[in-house]
């Protein structure tokens, strides 16, 4: 399942995702089509409930389309068997969740190590990657702390370090600016922009904060699960 040379980094083709609850069927995404160029940093914008988390979960292969297809780094997520799926989640995408999901009894260093555990790397190589990731987010001096000993912004930076440590080609960050003041929100976006620019990563960031839009290469606008438009040269809606 190696990545294909010139394939878009992320491609959604007529992706519909329906959730059925006791009382209704919700279309969290409705025939969404777009593609993102390799190495681009793209914002996914829309009101609460518009489908941002659903879209990112789909790109992370944590969830799958009801209809349509999702390709990431040239791979159709619905085609992945069990082993390839694990490898995809571990190595093709790096994910920063809206609720962080750091493990409370592990230090920052140990939390950032988690995605490296299944990888065939020497301990020295793992340590070097963790040290680099913590340095990238400015948390080198807090490596020995527990999550409960960090501020909200520091927790987020630890979650970003865990998202980038595996050196995956695609980084998916769900509302990383959510609870931060503007200056700190921008710092977080700047870390991800730096990651994209220096290491060629493709980055999707969901956000409510339209002020980050001049820092990214393009934007996907969602409303009620529909892609209403895209902006920027490095992202395009397909037949939308
Ligand atoms: N597991 C689920 N079961 C039923 N409905 C769901 C489920 N997950 C999401 N939804 C619904 O799908 C729609 C899109 O949700 P999603 O979490 O993707 O929105 P969002 O844009 O990320 O919102 P927010 O900005 O609040 O994080 C919402 O109407 C939500 O209620
Ligand atoms: Mg969300």
Image: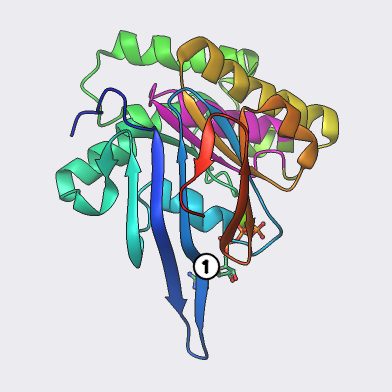
Q: Quadrant of ligand 1?
A: bottom right
Question: Is 176 rendered above or below residue 78?
Answer: above
Give the total number of marks visible in the rendering: 1
Residue behind mark 1: 28
Q: Is mark 1 within 8 Å of ligand 1?
A: yes
| Coordinates of residue 71 in the picture (x, y in percent) | 32, 44
Residue under the image location 68 percent in, 54 percent down: 46
Left/right placement of residue 142 relative to residue 203 reads: right
| Coordinates of residue 2 in the picture (x, y in percent) | 20, 29
Judged from this view, the residue extending furthest toward the bottom is 23
- Asked if residue 141 is among those painted magenta in the image, a careful observer would answer no
Question: Is 159 rendered above or below residue 197?
Answer: below
Residue under the image location 57 percent in, 64 percent down: 225
> Can you say which quadrant of the picture contains the N terminus?
top left
| Coordinates of residue 21 in the picture (x, y in percent) | 48, 83
- Asked if residue 162 is among those painted magenta in the image, a careful observer would answer yes
Visible residue check, residue 118: yes
Judged from this view, the residue extending furthest toward the front is 239
Q: Secondary structure at mark 1?
A: strand
Q: Quadrant of residue 232?
A: top right
Question: Is 26 rendered above or below residue 206?
Answer: below
Q: What kind of colouring is applied to the model shown?
A: rainbow
Read off the magenta span: 153-177
Q: Quadrant of residue 47?
A: bottom right
| Coordinates of residue 118 in the picture (x, y in percent) | 25, 31
Visible residue check, residue 131: no
Q: Residues within 10 Å of mark 1 (few under 14, many from 20)?
A: many
101, 238: nearer the viewer: 238
120, 178: nearer the viewer: 178
């Amino acid at each position: 399942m190696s990545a294909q040379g010139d394939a878009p980094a992320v491609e959604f083709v007529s992706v519909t995702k329906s959730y059925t609850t006791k009382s209704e069927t919700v279309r969290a995404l409705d025939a969404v089509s777009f593609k993102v160029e390799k190495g681009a940093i793209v914002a996914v914008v829309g009101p609460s409930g518009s489908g941002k988390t659903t879209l990112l979960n789909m790109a992370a292969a944590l969830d799958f389309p009801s209809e349509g297809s999702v390709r990431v780094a040239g791979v159709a997520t619905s085609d992945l068997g069990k082993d390839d799926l694990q490898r995809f989640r571990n190595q093709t995408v790096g994910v920063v969740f809206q609720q962080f999901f750091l493990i409370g009894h592990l230090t920052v260093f140990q939390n950032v190590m988690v995605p490296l555990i299944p990888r065939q790397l020497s301990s020295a190589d793992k340590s070097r990657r963790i040290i680099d990731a913590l340095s990238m987010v400015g948390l080198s001096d807090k490596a020995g702390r527990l999550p409960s000993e960090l501020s909200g912004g520091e927790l987020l930076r630890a979650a970003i370090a865990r998202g980038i440590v595996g050196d995956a080609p695609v980084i998916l960050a769900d509302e990383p600016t959510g609870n931060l003041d503007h200056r700190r929100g921008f710092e977080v976006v700047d870390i991800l922009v730096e990651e994209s620019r220096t290491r060629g990563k493709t980055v999707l960031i969901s956000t409510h904060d339209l002020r980050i839009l001049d820092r990214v290469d393009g934007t996907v606008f969602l409303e009620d699960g529909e892609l209403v438009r895209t902006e920027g040269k490095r992202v395009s809606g397909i037949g939308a």
